[in-house]
Image: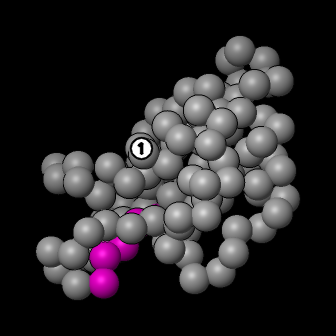
Amino acid sequence: RDRAPEGPAELLLRELAAGNVRPALSRLSTGTPIDQGTVDSELRLRLLSWRLMGRQDFGDRIELSYQGARSDWPDDERRPLWIRVARPTPGAPWRIVEFSAVY
């Protein structure tokens, strides 16, 4: 499969894990500001690891689902994260247009 759409999502997850929450979330192309509760949760519960669990392709929109482990959770507890990437025209760069997680 073409992994190019997964690149922006992996970059976002690496930045969140590094603690660069505000800059990482501010660069998303969601059209609306990220909820402050999401920012607070990402700062409080740092992402430690993640694994791609599913991918649904809809042409120029792709939905990625991950399981993530976070600080302050038991070692074996993982919860879902969802990232939607899209591109306005074929051949354009993929951009994150939606991010959500269960905290």
Q: Residue at x 17, y 80 (%)?
A: 90
Figure quadrant of residue 38: bottom right
* Left-right relation of 26 to 96: right
Q: Residue 1, percent across and down?
A: 16, 50
Helix, strand or loop at mark 1: helix
Q: Is residue 75 visible?
A: yes
Figure quadrant of residue 88: bottom left
Q: Is residue 78 visible?
A: no
Rendered-image quadrant of the C terminus: top right
Q: Residue 25, percent across and down?
A: 61, 59
* Left-right relation of 58 to 26: left
Q: Residue at x 21, y 75 (%)?
A: 92
Q: Residue 65, percent across and down?
A: 50, 50
Residue that label 1 marks = 10
Q: Nearest the camera: 85 or 8?
A: 8
- Residue 17 vertical placement versus 81 (above, below): above
* Left-right relation of 76 to 53: right
Q: Nearest the camera: 2 or 71?
A: 71
Magenta region, main secondary structure: strand
Q: Residue at x 59, y 34 (%)?
A: 17
Q: Residue at x 66, y 36 (%)?
A: 19
User: Magenta residues, as a range?
Assistant: 84-88
**86 falls in the magenta region:** yes
> What color scheme is it?
one colour
Figure quadrant of residue 48: top right
- Residue 79 vertical placement versus 72 (above, below): below
Marks counted in the figure total: 1
How many C-alpha atoms fall within 10 Å of the one at disc 1: few (<14), some, or many (≥20)? some
Q: Residue 45, percent across and down?
A: 78, 35
Three-letter amino acid code of the residue under disc 1: Glu
